[in-house]
């Protein structure tokens, strides 16, 4: 298993509010997390960094190779819910953190399966013979798209494109979406913030993953997002089985 990762401030933001983690669990399963923070002053990067730290520690503390996939998804879900409560409490106690929140997408690759939990519009993609978006954005535009009120082309440039309907820390309770997919040798799972997905289309993502060594994929993806405007912080993690 190979992992490449990179986070970049982009070309137009004054600070990077994305946070991420990559590493291996006790049985060498891969663990990866991407969080994209929001909030005034430094609250966004506090929310994202806190979420990454809490989610990783929660999973590492309770992880066991004896857990089956259902139990593992439950552990990931609990980690995200616990992080949400901690960030929410921080925002209630300190006015500097009022209104802060963060997206989260969490991945564990174990044996021939990828397990994913997410909240918000940070994404997971599966790249095999084609590229497939695994996660469903928790966003206003995604809802309008599914209701048939927007075409995919209109959705790309909608003024409310960045308005999300679910995030960690914004409300006391949150419901993460969790799923699992089979993974074959040579296939890749890509985690990213919307600073990548808004600036690099799926066709280009596929070509970059397929035409570059795994250790270079994240760098090339981030460079492409900057080349295409770099209007947001950009984070990419590629995990290849």
Image (spheres, rainbow, N blue to C red):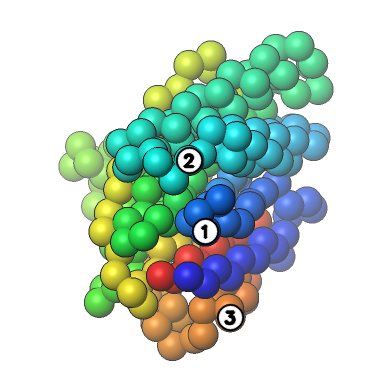
Decide: marks 3, 2 in contact (CB < 8 A)? no
Q: Nearer the viewer, residue 114 or 125?
A: 114
Q: Secondary structure at mark 3?
A: helix
Decide: marks 1, 2 in contact (CB < 8 A)? no
Image location of residue 126, percent across then percent down: 34, 63
Q: Is residue 125 visible?
A: no
Residue extending farthest to the left is 148
Kindly identify which residue carries mark 1. Answer: 28
Q: Secondary structure at mark 1?
A: loop
Name the residue located 55 percent from the left edge and 23 percent from the top edge: 82
Density class for disc 3 (Cα within 10 Å; few <14, some 14-19, many ≥20) is some
Is residue 199 positioned above or below 232 on the image? below
- Quadrant (top left/top right/bottom left/bottom right) for the C terminus: bottom left
Image location of residue 61, percent across then percent down: 60, 34
Name the residue located 81 percent from the left edge and 22 percent from the top edge: 96
Ranked by sequence position, the earlier of labels 3 and 2 is 2
Name the residue located 55 percent from the left edge and 37 percent from the top edge: 59
Nearer the observer, disc 1 or disc 3?
Answer: 1
Kindly identify which residue carries mark 2. Answer: 64
Kindly identify which residue carries mark 3. Answer: 216
Q: Secondary structure at mark 2?
A: loop
């Amino acid at each position: 298993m190979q992992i490449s990762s990179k986070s970049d401030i982009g070309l137009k933001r004054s600070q990077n509010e994305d946070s991420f983690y990559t590493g291996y669990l006790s049985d060498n399963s891969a663990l990866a997390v991407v969080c994209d923070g929001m909030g005034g002053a430094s609250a966004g990067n506090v929310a994202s960094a806190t979420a990454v730290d809490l989610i990783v520690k929660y999973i590492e503390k309770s992880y066991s190779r004896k857990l089956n996939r259902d139990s593992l998804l439950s552990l990931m879900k609990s980690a995200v819910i616990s992080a949400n409560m901690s960030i929410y409490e921080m925002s209630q106690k300190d006015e500097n953190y009022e209104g802060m929140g963060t997206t989260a997408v969490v991945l564990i690759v174990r044996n021939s399966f990828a397990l994913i939990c997410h909240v918000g519009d940070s994404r997971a993609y599966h790249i095999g013979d084609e590229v497939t978006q695994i996660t469903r954005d928790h966003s206003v535009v995604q809802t309008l798209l599914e209701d048939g009120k927007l075409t995919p082309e209109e959705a790309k440039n909608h003024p409310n494109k960045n308005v999300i309907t679910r995030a960690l820390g914004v409300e006391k309770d949150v419901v993460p979406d969790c799923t699992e997919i089979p993974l074959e040798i040579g296939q890749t799972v890509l985690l990213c913030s919307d600073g990548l997905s808004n600036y690099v289309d799926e066709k280009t993502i596929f070509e970059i993953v397929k035409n570059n060594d795994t250790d270079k994929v994240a760098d090339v993806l981030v460079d492409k997002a900057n080349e295409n405007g770099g209007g947001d912080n950009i984070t990419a993690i590629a995990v290849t089985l």
